[in-house]
Amino acid sequence: MLGPVLLAAARSDTIRRAVSAAPVTRPVVDRFIAGERLDQALAAVRTLTGRGLTVTLDHLGEDVTDPSQALRARDACLALAEALRSEGLGERAELSVKLSALGQALPGGHDIALRNAERVAEAAAEAGTCVTLDMEDHTTVDSTLAVLAQLRRRFPATGAVLQSYLFRTEEDARALAGEGSRVRLVKGAYKEPAAVAHQDRHQVDRAYVRCLRILMAGRGYPMIATHDPRMVAVAQELARRHGRKTDEYEFQMLYGIRENEQLRLAALGHRMRVYVPYGSDWYGYFMRRLAERPANLAFFLRSLATRH
């Protein structure tokens, strides 16, 4: 029951204030968030890329309720793209973007988010990199995939995220398994009703494998986002069966989690991309990381005393 409680807490302003003020919170956040400022995030990028890793950067923010907030989120992404360009990091770093941060939930939000995402994708292309659209709760999937289709007309490297816990995802994976498509496969981190999503983690795992099989058998570029050793092994075996070289797919893990495993996979010749979040609006992201698996709560608290 802890997972749903944490997910509900992720949208509570009262709990947000309490968690943000708690003395125990800041040291944990500092491990899993690469700072609140762009320069701090860039320092983390330089460290990670110096270790042979690649990155995807997420300027944290979501569910904006005012057009000015959407513009600020867009401008933060534009500043990030410009920083990557000026530092020559485009080949090693890409952008992850939440459309709800760009105005998707506003009146007329689909078109607002599309316009803002087009600006960001254009800036990313000028920096020699690309954008992946993060997936949010199930009510946003159709809009997000429609924005993806529009963006890929001009920016074909634009990627998308699929969440294996949604019943629809196998069909979406088939639709996105074509030439040039880039798909990050995750298990899912939002509180979804039983009518649209698997509730049992074993069912989510099995769905993840089914979706991974579809993507590996296709002609696109799978991005396997998991910290689960079983899923890493499954992905490696599926890649072998389908004759994929190590530059024809990649692994992704979160900043601050399983760092030794990240380095191990990179040393084996895999492209290992680290999801690097930064910014002051870290609360929702932080709570979802706790809720993905209730045992993560103990993991996060243990991290106060030791690094893995």
Image (tube, rainbow, N blue to C red):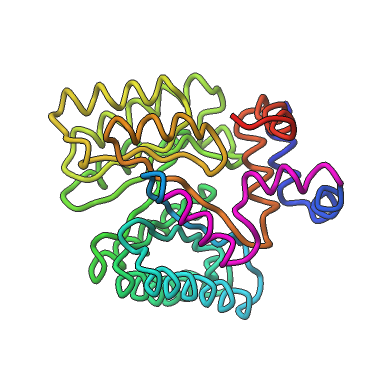
Q: Position of 95 compared to 302: left or right?
A: left
Nearer to us in this view, 72 or 170: 72
Query: Which quadrant holds residue 170?
Result: top left
Furthest toward the left, the residue is 243
Q: Position of residue 231 (x, y in %)?
A: 39, 24
Q: Position of 15 compared to 46: left or right?
A: right
Q: Position of residue 70 (x, y in %)?
A: 57, 74
Q: Position of residue 142 (x, y in %)?
A: 41, 55
The answer to whether residue 76 is magenta is no
Quadrant location, the C terminus:
top right
SS majority, magenta = helix
Task: Identify whether 78 is placed above or below 147.
Answer: below
Residue at image coords 56%, 71%: 73
- Is residue 62 in sight in this rendering? no
Query: Which quadrant holds residue 132?
Result: bottom left
Task: Identify whether 205 is placed above or below 251.
Answer: above
- Is residue 47 in sight in this rendering? yes
Quadrant location, the N terminus:
top right
Q: Which residues are magenta?
A: 23-49
- The number of numbered badges drawn on the structure is 0
Q: Position of residue 297 (x, y in %)?
A: 71, 30
Residue at image coords 59%, 58%: 278
